[in-house]
Image (cartoon, grey):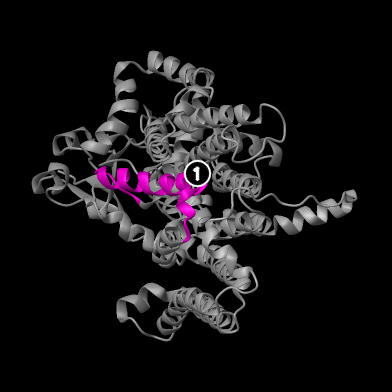
Amino acid sequence: MPNEDFQDLPTAEALPGERAGRWAREYLPVLLFAFLMLCVVPMRDLWSPDEPDFAQCVKEMHQRGTWLLPWLNGQVYTEKPILYYWAMKAANQGFAWLTGGLGFSHGVAAWALRLPSAVGSVAFLLAFQRWGARFLQVGVARLAVMILAVSPLWFWQSQFIQIDLFFSVLLAWAWLCWLGGYLLQRGIKPELVPGEAGRWFLKGYLFLGLAFLAKGPLAAVLSLLVLVAFLAWQRDGGILKEMRLGTGLGLFLLVVAPWYVVASLVGGKEYAYALIIHQNFERATKAWDHIQPWWRYFEYILGDFFPWVFLLPALGFFLKGSGALRSASARFLTVAFVVPFLFLSWAQSKQGKYLLPSFPFLALLLAGMLQPLAVEGVSAERIRRIGLGLAAALGLVGVALLAVAGGAGGAKVQADLGALRPMAWVLGGIGTLGGLSLVGRSLSGQGRHLVPETALTLGLFYLVGGTWGFRVLDARKGYQGWTAAAKPVLEGRKVWFWGEIRSGGMIYLDTLMPELRASAGLAQVGAEDRLVVIASRWRPGYQGLDKAAMAEFEPVLVQLQGEDRWLVMARKPK
C-alpha cells in the first residue's frame, strides 16, 4: 500500500486551455467510460426481469401525479424506498420535456430511465479518482478507476435500470468520505483548510442518509459493521468523540426521516412493515427468493470481478508480506471488502450485485499492489507472474469465443449463438489479441502497461457487445414484438396475469393486469376476459395450480419472449 505520508508535488500554474488538457489526460479512463455509457445506454429496450417493473412504477407515478410512493400494477410497491424512483422519474420527465418526447413510448424511454445508474457511475468514478489522488497516490487512483470501471458487474449495473449501482455509489462514497475525515482528524493526512476533517465526516453522514433513502436499513447495518470492525482493529474508540457524531446523526435523520414518516402515515402500518422489516430483516434471515448457500459469493465474484479476481491470492500475500496492513487506509479498505462479504454470505438471500459497494475498496487495494509495477527496478519476475496471469484470463476467453464461433459447443450452443456468430468472431479476436499483447508486455518487463491494456481490452469487449450484441438480442428480449402481437387480442378486454407480474407484458399496452396467484382466483376470469401467462409458470403445482383449472383455458396467442413463451389464454367455450 502506498505511503500515507506521500504528497504529490505541486505543478506550475497552467493556462485555461492547458488546464483542460491536463484534466482530460488525467481523467481519460473516466472519460472513456462515459463514452462507453453514451454508446451503450440507448442500444436496447427494457429487459426482464427488473427493468420493465421499474419503468412501470415510474409510468404509474406519473399517471397518478405522485412523488410520494411508487406504484406497480395499481398497487403501492413496497420493495424499496423512494430515492431511486425520484431519480428515474426526474430523468424521464425532464428528458421527455427537453426532447419533446423523442424516443419515448407510452410515457417512458429506457435510455432516460438508465441515466441515474449511468450518470451516478460516471460521477462516482470522477470523485473516486479525486479521492484516491487526495488521500493515497495519483497513480493508485488512476489504476483503481480502470480496475473498477471494467469489472463486469460494475459495467453491467451502470447501464441497467436497477437500484444496486445507484445505492452502491452512495454507500461507497459515504465510507470514503468518513475515511477521509478519519485520516485528516488523526493527522495521517494534513488538512488543506481548517476544519476539513469535520466536513468530510459530515459528507459521509449525508451520503449515508441518501443510501438509506435508496435501499433502506442495509446501508446503516453495513456501515455500522464496517465502522466497528475498523475501529476495533485500530483500537481507536476515541474517534467516536471527534467525528461529529451528534451533528452527523441529525443530518442523517434530516435526510431520511421526512419521507419515511410521511410515507408510513400515508401507506399505513402494513406498508411500513413491508418496507422496513419484510424487505430487509426478513429477507436476510427468512428469505423467500435468491436463497443460496453460504459460499455462493466465492462463485459470483469469479465472473463479477473478472479478471482481477485472479490476482486476489497475490494481493493477500502482498498485504501480509509488505506490512501494508499497518496503515489505517489499508485496514479500512480491507475491512470495507471483507466485512460485507462475510455478512452477505451469512444472509440467506444472495445476489452478486449485493457486494457491489465493496468493489471500489477492493479496486484500491489491488491498485496499491499493482502501481509499483510501473516503477523502474521492480522485479521482472513479478511483472511476468501478474501479467501472464491476466493474459491467460483474457486469452482463454478469446480462444473460447473463437472456438464457439467456429462451431464448438454442440448443437444447442450453436443454435443459441445464431445471429451473434459474427460478433463472437470479433470478440474472440479482441480477447486473443489483448492476451497476446499482455504476454509481450509481461515478457519485456513493461509493468506499467498491464492494467491499462487489460482495461482497454475489456472496454472494447463491452463496446462491441453493448452496441452490436444488444441490438441483435433486443429483437428477442425487448417487448415491442410482444406488444405488437398481444395488442389486437387484449385491446378492450379485462386482462389478468397469472403469478407475480412481469411488467414487460403491460408497459406498452396501457392496461393494468391484476395478479392471480392461486387456482381459485382463476374463477374471476370471465368469458370475454383474457389471462396472460408465462409458459414456464403455467404448469401443475406452480402456486397450487391444478390440472382441472388449467383445462378450462386455451391459448389464443403464443409469443416467444426472451428464453420463454408468453401466452394469452381465454376460457374454453362451454
Q: Nearer the viewer, residue 274 or 24?
A: 24
Q: Is residue 488 visible?
A: no
Say if the magenta span includes residue 337: yes
Q: Is residue 315 above or below residue 157?
A: below
Residue at the spot x=20%, y=37% of the render?
286
Q: Position of residue 251 (x, y in %)?
A: 54, 20
Relative placement, left or right, of 23 versus 392 is right
Q: In the rendered view of the protein, which quadrant contains the C terminus?
A: top left
Q: Is residue 78 above or below residue 26?
A: above
Q: Nearer the viewer, residue 488 or 5?
A: 5
Q: Nearer the viewer, residue 304 or 529?
A: 304
Q: Residue 91 sits in which quadrant?
A: top right
Q: Position of residue 45 (x, y in %)?
A: 51, 53
Q: Which residue is mark 1?
A: 328
Magenta residues span: 322-351
Crowding near pointer 1: few (<14 within 10 Å), some, many (20+)?
many
Q: Position of residue 299 (x, y in %)?
A: 31, 60
> Tag 1: residue type?
Ala
Residue at the spot x=39%, y=85% of the render?
407
Q: Is residue 11 above or below residue 257?
A: below
Q: Residue furthest bottom?
A: 406
Say if the magenta span includes residue 574: no
